[in-house]
Amino acid sequence: MTFHTPGNTKTTWVNCKISALANEHLSNSAELSNRSKKCEAELRLEDHLRRFESISSVGNVTERKK
């Protein structure tokens, strides 16, 4: 499953470490949405980056101007 802007066919791989708590939340979310953890993480990262311009800490974000 790939989420990108129409016409934008370039993709890249990102690997990162997450906390045990974040992994638990990701696993639960993936199960509830019937997606794999990989697809859930990809969708959530794509959504976050489209909606927020910056983040200084968890919960402290600057929304992207529309």
Image (cartoon, rainbow, N blue to C red):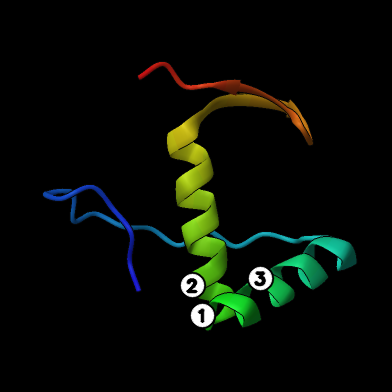
Tag nearer the camera, 3 or 2? 3
Element type at mark 2 = helix
Residue drawn at point x = 77 percent, y = 66 percent: 25
- 66 versus 39 height, above or below: above
Residue on which disc 1 sits: 35
- Residue 44 in the image: x percent, y percent? 54, 55
Q: CA distance from mark 1 to mark 2?
A: 6 Å
First in sequence, mark 3 or 2: give its number: 3
Element type at mark 1 = loop
Q: CA distance from mark 3 to mark 1?
A: 8 Å
- Residue 58 in the image: x percent, y percent? 79, 36
Q: Is residue 12 left or right of residue 21?
A: left
Other-residue count near label 2 (Cα within 10 Å), few / some / many at <14 / 14–19 / ≥20 = some
Q: Disc 1 residue type?
A: Arg
Q: Is residue 65 left or right of residue 15?
A: left
- State yes or no: discs 1 and 2 in contact (Cβ < 8 Å): yes
Residue drawn at point x = 53 percent, y = 51 percent: 45
Residue 39, numbered label:
2
Residue on which disc 3 sits: 29
Other-residue count near label 3 (Cα within 10 Å), few / some / many at <14 / 14–19 / ≥20 = some
Q: Is residue 65 left or right of residue 31?
A: left
Other-residue count near label 1 (Cα within 10 Å), few / some / many at <14 / 14–19 / ≥20 = some
Tag nearer the camera, 1 or 2? 1
Q: Disc 3 residue type?
A: Ser
- Residue 27 in the image: x percent, y percent? 71, 76
Q: Disc 2 residue type?
A: Cys
Residue 23 location, quadrant:
bottom right
Direction front: furthest residue: 32
Quadrant in which the N terminus appears: bottom left
Who is closer to the viewer here, 10 or 35? 35
Residue drawn at point x = 55 percent, y = 76 percent: 33
- Residue 13 in the image: x percent, y percent? 45, 62
